[in-house]
Image (cartoon, grey):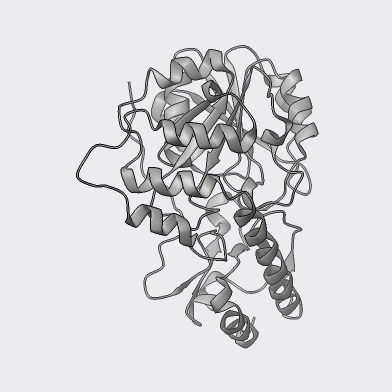
Amino acid sequence: MLFPQDPVEHGGQAQGLTDLSASLNPLGAHPDAVKAAQNAVLGQYPSPNAFELIEAAAQRHGISYDCVVPVPGSSWAIWFLLLFLSGTVHTLLIPTPDFSEYARTANMVGMEARTVPRLHGFEVDFDTLVARSNRHSCVIFSNPNNPSGFAHTPDQVLGYAERFSGIVIVDEAFAPLAPNGYDVLQAGQIPENMIVIRSLTKELALPGLRMGYIVANPHLTEKMRRCLPPWPLSAPSLAAAVVGLRDKEYGRKGGEVARSTLKEIAGILREKGMSSYDTFANYMLFRGPISASKFLERGLMVRDCSSFGLTGHIRISSPMVDDRVRVTELIKEIEP
């Protein structure tokens, strides 16, 4: 049974503005993925089980095909996973601040959502989570964290999962844009109680095409696939996903460009009294005397983080490469 919940605030809603609220690859839409989507055959049904994506994801990560479940984006994956687990999981533990859809979806499927504050620097309080875990509990967190950009290493995450009594869901939507060494799936085999969510819309900068996948132990994925409707991805989304999965470096290169640009922006804002947090993602969290409305006056939409419980904080995503100079010049004009 589903319990209707009001929508929550998200970025990516800019109309006629330069959007720094949506966190996408600053290199822009992957050109080959765009071509693949444009050339997709629309006059016939796509693969009923999206096996092309399963095969490409398995090859990228060096894992078995039966570990992969195709989904139309990470937000859909969150909804599907919590609904799938709701018969046996009673409590969802959420290290906060984090993506607001976790708590909303938990309430939607009848789970009790319990927040556990993150430690200083946005580290996950693994010890508290372990102490509160049982076989009917599940924890979900983003890595890198949204909105801070902080990331735990795979060793930290995997070591924690071994101590946790329930299911551990790691949302790696932004992991393809993080530096090498911050990808849980690089370890190959993951613990039986771990589920990893991957998004392709961020790294390929194609949010209009909903595409992603879930990685877990086969004893879970076999049941998940039997709960999927046929044709989980449209033909254009499936075609773009396969091409994008073959290009491991596009996300990494975009992440490097993003962090370089954000470092420049941080220097500009520091002179205006703002302070920032270190980031492993393609966005950065700031606090200080400049509000989101000040950016809006210059035609720049940033993410007010009050909805994350972070009053006085804003999240700024890296602008697209072609907008970098113009955006930095506009930010220089902002007065606290």
Across and down, in percent, residue 186 comes to 71, 36
Quarter of the image for residue 153 reads top right
Side (left or right) of 260 relative to 303: right
User: Looking at the image, is 47 positioned above or below residue 205?
Assistant: above
The picture places residue 21, in percent across and down from the top left corner, at 51, 63
Quarter the N terminus occupies:
top left
Q: From the viewer's side, name the closer residue of 122 and 310.
A: 122
- In-front residue for pair 37/134: 37
Q: Looking at the picture, how far across and down is residue 266, in whole percent? A: 72, 72
266 displayed left or right of 91: right
Q: How many marks?
A: 0
The reply to whether residue 271 is visible in this rendering is yes
Residue at (71% x, 19% y) in the render: 164
Q: Percent position (x, y) of residue 327?
A: 58, 80
Q: Quadrant of residue 304?
A: bottom right
Vertical placement of 211 versus 190: above or below? below
Name the residue nearer the viewer: 91 or 210.
210
Q: Residue at x 65, y 13 (%)?
A: 134
Q: Quadrant of the C terminus?
A: bottom right
**Residue 78 seen in render:** no
Seen at 51% across and 55% down, the residue is 204
Q: What's the residue at 42%, 30% (across, down)?
A: 51
